[in-house]
């Protein structure tokens, strides 16, 4: 089953890592061990990455 979901997110910081947080509303569809294809299109560069 292929379903396409498009979300726009800011990259968050968790310690030294940059992360993408999945919205809670998708929690039931994106359970642990679910395999997804993630394509990233950079829409706007960060001014200061620190």
Image (cartoon, rainbow, N blue to C red):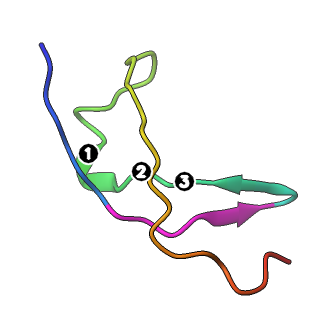
- In the rendered image, which quarter contains the N terminus? top left
Report the Cα–Cα distance between label 1 and label 2.
Answer: 7 Å
Foreground: 17 or 6? 6
The answer to whether 30 is drawn above or below residue 45 in the figure is above
Residue 8 sits above or below residue 28 on the image: below
- Quadrant assignment for the C terminus: bottom right
Pointer 1 with pointer 2, Cβ within 8 A: yes
Q: Are marks 2 and 3 in contact (CB under 8 Å)?
A: yes
Using a 10 Å C-alpha cutoff, classify the residue at mark 2 as few (fewer than 14 neighbours), some (14 to 19) or many (20 or more): few
Q: Position of residue 4 (x, y in %)?
A: 17, 36
Q: Residues within 10 Å of mark 1 (few under 14, many from 20)?
A: few
Which corner quadrant of the image does residue 41 belong to? bottom left
Give the residue number, with chain letter if any, for mark 2. 22
Residue sitting at x 24%, y 35%: 28
- In this rendered view, identify the residue nearer to me: 41 or 25: 41
Residue 14's spot in the image, x, y percent? 75, 59
Q: Which residues are magenta?
A: 8-14
Marks 3 and 1, how far apart at CA: 13 Å
- Residue beneath the point at 47% across and 47% down: 40
What is the distance, in whole Å, between disc 2 and disc 3 at their CAs? Answer: 6 Å
Mark number, residue 39 = none
Q: Nearer the viewer, residue 41 or 50?
A: 41
Q: Which mark is residue 20?
A: 3
Is 21 located above or below residue 28 in the figure?
below
The residue lying at 66 percent from left, 79 percent from top is 46
Q: Secondary structure at mark 3?
A: loop
Determine the residue positioned at 54% across, 53% down.
Answer: 20
Taking the magenta stretch, the answer to whether it contains residue 39 is: no
Determine the secondary structure under disc 2. Answer: loop
Crowd class of label 3 (few under 14; some 14 to 19; many from 20; radius 10 Å) = few
Please give left or right for residue 24 compared with residue 38 in the image. Answer: left
Label of residue 26 in the image: 1
């Amino acid at each position: 089953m292929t379903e396409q979901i498009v979300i726009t997110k800011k990259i968050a910081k968790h310690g030294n890592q940059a992360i993408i947080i999945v919205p809670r509303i998708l929690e039931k569809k994106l359970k642990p061990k679910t395999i997804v294809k993630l394509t990233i299109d950079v829409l706007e560069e960060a001014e200061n990455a620190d």
